[in-house]
């Protein structure tokens, strides 16, 4: 997913002279082809995230479209004020490419886990948040980033994930994709969690409980139309995110219900990371297991919701 | 150094705004009137009737709390009617306690949180280089402001890119909100710091019009490096009761008596 994302930046830069790339201190050779081809639009600025965001703002104020790239924790927490004021208050078309959203960097510990990024980005007016589910969807999404007039936070998964998105679904920022028609329940998911939701839906279907999967790649702005359409049609809703249960997709869906259809809120269960810092290392999958974000947990939670309602 | 009539005229515009809003960063604005005056009178190229003219020089007030001085000079240059200053900080005004980009013509960036302007200026200076434009970027910072680490990240970057089209003016009035900068977080040796970060550095009396004009006439100081100008100034300059007094960094609930005594200083 990451490689596809960065390759897309290069492709976009070839076609549009407004595109620039700004990294902090990434691995050797990142976007080397772009660096060689257009050195004046390739920047590697060092471990200085606050400055990098401000510099991107200055370039955007002059009509450029900067794609800023570093590890998700450092592009959110470290420079939050610059993101809020330089990018969001001024509403600039800067794209934040966040490596390792969620528990991708599990072995590196809590300093490197971006598990509250959706919540803190979502609180900022004008910010758009997109978490594609696989590399192919990333490619379709990146093509749409050129003309989007607002800042975008792009959450990258680990990479090497299975491709579950489909070309015929296309991609529009802010429009959720129904990957599977709901039966009695629907999983509402974002990012690579869509993948395990599809597996859970397979399991449930085999047990005679067909459930849908609504892939909400754009966490903000939330697709209120899709939610308003599907939520009343099902008996159970399970939101799934590789993110703290505070302030992410599940919270957004509950807030939507509270605003527009409060009677639907009782159908919703939220699966996400509990409210504590990671207390294990291991791998992304072992941490997800530890937190109860598994195919079986999704299945069980959906069954519970369907029984309740 | 005595103030001439134009410097008093600009200060009077600020007092008019303070009278409207009954609050504001008086000390922080008065220390940099002459810096902005010389920049706008003698250095920057701009068109008040075409504020987004692409070849204009960009002037970013990074110490956004000094915005009263910026508003005063922009009104003086005809970006908007001076009468509008009286709306300062009122609910629907275009002039808040910190300047916002897109609200008021002539404001080049939304500032107020400190340590942001130099990075934005670096981005603008790089944009000029990529597009082979000849505009220059001036960034005015406070002294307390450069406590912020982000300023030094930006300084390293400006130096790395050899941005000779970028000049930082430090309004070094030696007082920050709590008290003397030397007590709160000493900046010295300040010229050495900027020099070691790769800047060409000059010091100047920030109220000496001739010295400031001579200096800006020779910018950039070095064709291969960004410039830093350390402007030695007096906080609250022009108002004996406020000069060098930390408590005049920001004042709210200004009384009519205080406003009257300000006008009296400017006769």
Image (cartoon, coloured by chain):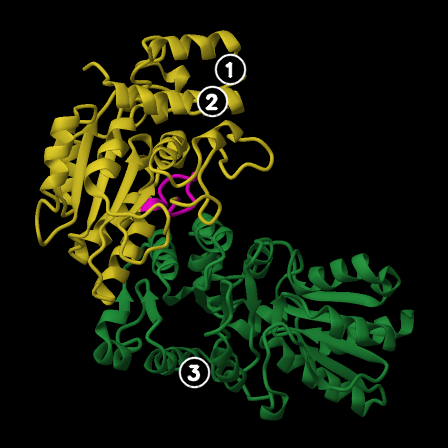
Residue extent of the magenta highlight: B107-117
Q: Name the residue that disc number 1 marks.
A: B254
- Colour of the chain lettered B: yellow
Q: Name the residue that disc number 2 marks.
A: B18
Q: Is residue B5 left or right of residue B247?
A: left
Which residue is more in the foreground, A135 or A283? A135
- Colour of the chain lettered A: green
Examine the rendering and report whether any part of residue B40 can be seen.
Answer: yes
Q: Mark 1, residues whose alpha carbon is within 10 Å: few (<14), some, or many (≥20)?
A: some
Residue A73 percent coordinates (x, y):
46, 59
Q: Is residue A145 left or right of residue B33?
A: right
Residue A193 percent coordinates (x, y):
62, 76
Which residue is more in the foreground, A221 or A211? A221
| Magenta-drawn stretch contains B115 | yes
Figure quadrant of residue A285? bottom right
Q: Main secondary structure of the magenta part?
A: loop
Q: Residue A295: which numbered mark, if any?
A: none
Query: Which residue is rendered at x = 36% and y = 66% of the image?
Result: A64
Q: Is residue B258 left or right of residue B169?
A: right
Which residue is more in the foreground, A187 or B8? B8
- Find numbered disc 2 in the image and state the secondary structure of the residue it sits on: helix
């Amino acid at each position: 997913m990451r490689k596809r994302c960065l390759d897309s930046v290069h492709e976009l830069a070839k076609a549009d002279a407004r595109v620039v790339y700004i990294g902090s201190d990434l691995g050797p050779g990142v976007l080397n082809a772009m660096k060689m081809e257009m050195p004046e639009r390739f920047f590697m600025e060092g471990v200085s995230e606050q400055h990098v965001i401000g510099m991107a703002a200055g370039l955007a104020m002059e009509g450029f479209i900067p794609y800023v790239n570093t590890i998700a924790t450092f592009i959110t927490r470290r420079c939050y004020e610059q993101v809020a004021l330089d990018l969001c208050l001024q509403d600039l078309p800067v794209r934040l490419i966040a490596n390792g959203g969620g528990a991708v960097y599990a072995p590196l510990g809590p300093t490197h886990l971006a598990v509250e990024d959706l919540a803190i980005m979502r609180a900022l007016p004008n910010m758009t948040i997109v978490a594609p589910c696989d590399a192919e969807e990333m490619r379709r999404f990146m093509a749409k980033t050129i003309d989007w007039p607002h800042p975008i936070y792009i959450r990258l998964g680990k990479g090497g994930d299975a491709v579950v998105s489909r070309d015929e679904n296309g991609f529009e920022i802010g429009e959720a994709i129904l990957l599977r028609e709901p039966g009695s329940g629907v999983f509402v998911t974002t990012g690579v969690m869509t993948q395990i939701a599809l597996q859970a839906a397979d399991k449930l279907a085999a047990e005679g409980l067909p459930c849908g999967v609504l892939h909400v790649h754009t966490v903000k702005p939330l697709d209120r139309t899709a939610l308003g359409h599907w939520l009343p049609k099902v008996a159970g809703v399970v939101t799934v995110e590789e993110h703290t249960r505070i302030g992410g997709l599940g919270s957004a869906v509950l807030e939507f219900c509270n605003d527009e259809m409060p009677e639907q809120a009782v159908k919703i269960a939220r699966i996400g990371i509990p409210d504590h810092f990671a207390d294990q290392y291991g791998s992304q999958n072992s941490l997800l297991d530890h937190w109860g974000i598994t195919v079986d947990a999704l299945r069980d939670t959906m069954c519970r919701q369907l029984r309740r309602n | 150094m005595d103030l001439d009539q134009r410097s008093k005229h600009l200060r009077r515009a600020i007092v008019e705004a303070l009278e409207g809003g009954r609050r504001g960063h008086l000390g922080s604005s008065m220390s940099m009137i002459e810096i902005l005056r010389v920049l706008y009178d003698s250095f920057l190229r701009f068109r008040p009737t075409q504020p987004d003219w692409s070849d204009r020089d960009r002037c970013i007030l990074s110490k956004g709390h000094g915005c009263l001085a910026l508003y005063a000079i922009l009104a003086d240059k005809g970006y908007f009617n001076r009468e509008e200053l009286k709306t300062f900080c009122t609910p629907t005004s275009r002039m808040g306690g910190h300047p916002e980009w897109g609200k008021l013509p002539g404001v080049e960036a939304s500032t107020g949180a400190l340590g942001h302007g130099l990075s934005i200026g670096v981005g603008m200076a790089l944009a000029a280089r990529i597009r082979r434009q000849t505009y220059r970027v001036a960034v005015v910072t406070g002294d307390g402001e450069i406590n912020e680490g982000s300023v030094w990240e930006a300084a390293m970057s400006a130096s790395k890119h050899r941005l000779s089209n970028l000049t930082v003016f430090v309004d070094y009035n030696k007082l920050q909100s709590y008290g003397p900068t030397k007590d709160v977080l000493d900046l010295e040796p300040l010229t050495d710091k900027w020099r070691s970060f790769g800047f060409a550095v000059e010091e100047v009396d920030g109220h000496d019009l001739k010295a400031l004009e001579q200096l800006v006439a020779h910018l950039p100081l070095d064709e291969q490096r960004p410039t830093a100008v350390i402007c030695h100034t007096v906080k609250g300059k022009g108002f004996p009761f406020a000069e060098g007094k930390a408590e005049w960094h920001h004042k709210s609930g200004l009384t009519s008596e205080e406003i009257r005594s300000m006008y009296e200083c400017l006769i």
